[in-house]
Amino acid sequence: GNALALDIGGTKIAAAIVAEDGTLSERQQIATPHGDAAGLAGALEKLITPWRNRVDLIAAASTGIISQGRLTALNPANLGGLAGFPLQDCIRAVADLPNVVLNDGQAAAWAEYQAVQETCDNALFVTVSTGVGGGIIWNRKLLTGRNGLAGHIGHTAFDPQGGLCGCGRRGCVESVASGTAIGHAMMENARPLGAEQVFERARAGNSKAQRVIGRSAAAVASMLADMHISLDLDVVMMGGSVGLAEGYREKVAHALNQLPAIYRVALLPAHHRQDSGLIGAALWARATL
Ligand code: ADP
Ligand code: BMX
Ligand code: ZN
């Protein structure tokens, strides 16, 4: 049968039907409502209702720490201040079907791993998007952790003198490298730019924009080196709208290549591009239900 897959990010919610063979159809995308639980619940109800009699299961990947069916934001700022949400109960209230929920970086890692599993035992997925997230495959298994925390690599430290991250720690990679951080590093008329605009300006030769993107790439490269020396990775795969933006991966790879050889790790673009979370959630549901 078919699965309804959802991918709830800090910026957008994607939904699609995923068939048993992993093919995706009926993809839709809406902006993530920010600020309160009622807004998010309403958006999910709208996406799920038309499909509830036509699918066998619902699989949701979501930003935030996902534990026992609940979303707890590590960085509430990414969801407009929303700190917690009963994701599994909310889905079940709309559709009484088997449902599985897991972190978006973990889900994407599981989908991306399928593409490299013939040659790789240990792999890392990283998303550079509203935040910086990730998922770890260790000895061919997806790590979720007893508390759903595994893979939250965006909250490893980059700059001990840096600004406060929304998680409460100082100088996290996410607070320097995310799309949100890139946008906030360039104010205009007292308002932050979007990361897309910073990339546009960098391409047009703006040196401030180039520095901001360079610092993001340097922070991600340093994090990947730390992950590689910790886990002996066979490969890293990168997604998210910033991670997939033209030229960004090359900048991260360049920064990695400045490090001693032992820290360098192969860095590939996400095979499923923007759909890794959707596909991974559906695959994970079928593997665990
Ligand atoms: P989500 O975090 O909801 O999964 P995305 O992966 O699209 O969503 O990440 C959103 C972030 O990516 C925002 O900060 C946005 O400004 C930035 N972004 C979106 N499109 C682009 C682009 N083409 N180039 C660079 N940054 C982008
Ligand atoms: C944040 C954190 C992670 C998430 C990552 C990427 C929250 C709400 N989210 O570090 O759980 O995996 O962002 O999320 O604390 P995205 O929205 O950028 O895809
Ligand atoms: Zn943090």
Image (cartoon, rainbow, N blue to C red):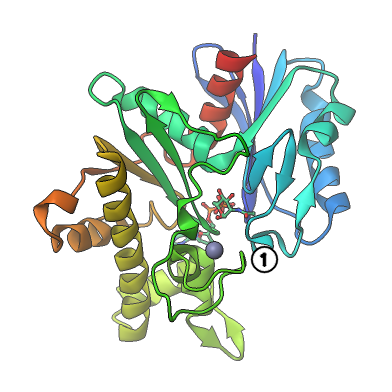
Foreground pick, 73 / 32:
73
Residue 35 shows up from this direction: yes
Give the residue drawn at x 84%, y 24%. 95
Foreground pick, 199 / 215:
215
Spot occupied by residue 151 in the image (x, y as percentages of width and height)? 48, 44
- Quadrant where the C terminus is found in the figure: top right
Q: Quadrant of residue 249?
A: bottom left
Q: Residue furthest bottom?
A: 189
- Quadrant where the N terminus is found in the figure: top right
Task: Check disc 1 and report the residue beneath it.
Answer: 77
Q: Residue furthest left?
A: 261
Give the residue drawn at x 56%, y 32%. 278
Task: Please say if 111 is above or below 202.
Answer: above
Spot occupied by residue 77 in the image (x, y as percentages of width and height)? 67, 65
Task: Please say if 169 is above or below 205.
Answer: above
213 sits left or right of 25 in the view:
left
Give the residue drawn at x 39%, y 54%. 243
237 sits left or right of 197 in the view:
left
Spot occupied by residue 52 in the image (x, y as percentages of width and height)? 81, 21
Q: Quadrant of residue 268?
A: top left
Determine if the C-beta at disc 1 is less than 8 A from ligand 2.
no
- Mark 1 packing: few (<14 Cα in 10 Å), some, or many (20+)? some
Foreground pick, 39 / 132:
132
Q: What amino acid is labelled 1 in the image?
A: Ala
Q: Quadrant of residue 219?
A: bottom left
Mark 1: secondary structure:
helix
Task: Please say if 116 is above or below 165.
Answer: above
56 sits left or right of 156 in the view:
right
Residue 247 shows up from this direction: no
Spot occupied by residue 221 in the image (x, y as percentages of width and height)? 29, 59
Foreground pick, 156 / 10:
156
Image mark count: 1
